[in-house]
Image (cartoon, rainbow, N blue to C red):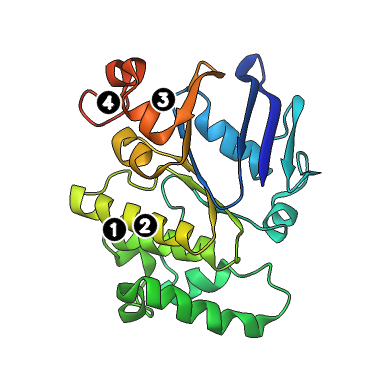
Amino acid sequence: MLEVERLAVQYGPITALRGVSFRVPAGRIAALLGANGAGKTTVMRAVTGLVTPQRGRILLDGEEIQGLPPHLIVRRGVGVCPEGRRLFPHLSVMDNLRLGAYTLADPRQQDPLLEQIFALFPRLAERRRQPAGTLSGGEQQMLALGRALMSRPRLLLLDEPSLGLAPLLVAEVFATIGKLNAQGVTILLVEQNAHAALAIAHHAYVLENGRLVLEGTGPEMLSHPYLKAAYLGNGQEG
């Protein structure tokens, strides 16, 4: 599904990624771990076309997508739920969801998608006319996920989906991620809660200072001495 090969990204004189390579097979969940500033969000921004890499390739189903504008990458089946949710707070829940479907060629496709979103997140159905900015943190995260799903992605990028949520809501968000994957959505997950991410990930990668330093299956990484010392001591990344 997704292959990243020797990816290098610079912001002016600052090198954010230094030859990063990894893959996310179709139908799997891959977690990307690392401390703040390690390069995780830069990977997401490169895959979605928000930054152009200086070197390397990004392939989706074998076709290069690096350098394409974001809307064309979305049309190819990549959805994103960004860090901080990035909702339109003064627009209603329904309007935020419909904005997620702007790349669909036929507007009539929106209604069946909305029904699926409301089945997955019944609270959004109850609040469909409510401004997004008045929702709770958990409800806003549901809305951000729902908006990403409105583009019918085959590959879903999740950037810190549990950030700022209470533990019970974190469990709910990760249960939903598992359901989406079971329905066939391939997922690349960047997450502060390393325990929760590794518990559902088929494979995981660790970045440090823009380099890939460790990889393995989710269960392997949960018991890896390096990760235990660096990120798993209290269930959070450092």
What's the amino acid at mark 1? Gly
Q: Is residue 44 visible?
A: yes
Give the residue at x 39% y 55%.
178
Give the residue at x 38% y 80%.
129
Which callout, 4 or 2, points at the residue further toward the start of the chain?
Answer: 2
Which callout, 3 or 1, points at the residue further toward the start of the chain?
Answer: 3
Do callouts 4 and 2 mark residues in contact (Cβ within 8 Å)?
no
Q: In terms of secondary structure, where does tag 3 sit?
A: loop
Give the residue at x 52% y 34%.
41
Can you identify the residue that label 4 sits on? 232
In the picture, the disc for residue 36 is 3
Does 107 sit left or right of 62 as displayed? left
Q: CA distance from mark 2 to mark 1?
A: 5 Å
Quarter of the picture holding the C terminus: top left
Residue 12, compared with residue 135, is above or below; it is above
Q: Residue furthest right?
A: 63
Residue 56, image x, y percentages? 75, 27
What's the amino acid at mark 2? Gln
Residue 227, compared with residue 27, is above or below; it is above
Q: CA distance from mark 4 to mark 1?
A: 24 Å
Residue 5, compared with residue 119, is above or below; it is above
Do callouts 2 and 1 mark residues in contact (Cβ within 8 Å)?
yes
Q: Is residue 206 visible?
A: no
Residue 23, image x, y percentages? 62, 36
Q: In this rendering, which labeled residue sits more in front, label 4 or label 3?
A: 4
Can you identify the residue that label 2 sits on? 141
Can you identify the residue that label 1 sits on? 138
Q: CA distance from mark 2 to mark 3?
A: 21 Å
Crowding at dot 4, Cα within 10 Å, few <14 / some 14-19 / many 20+, comes out as: many
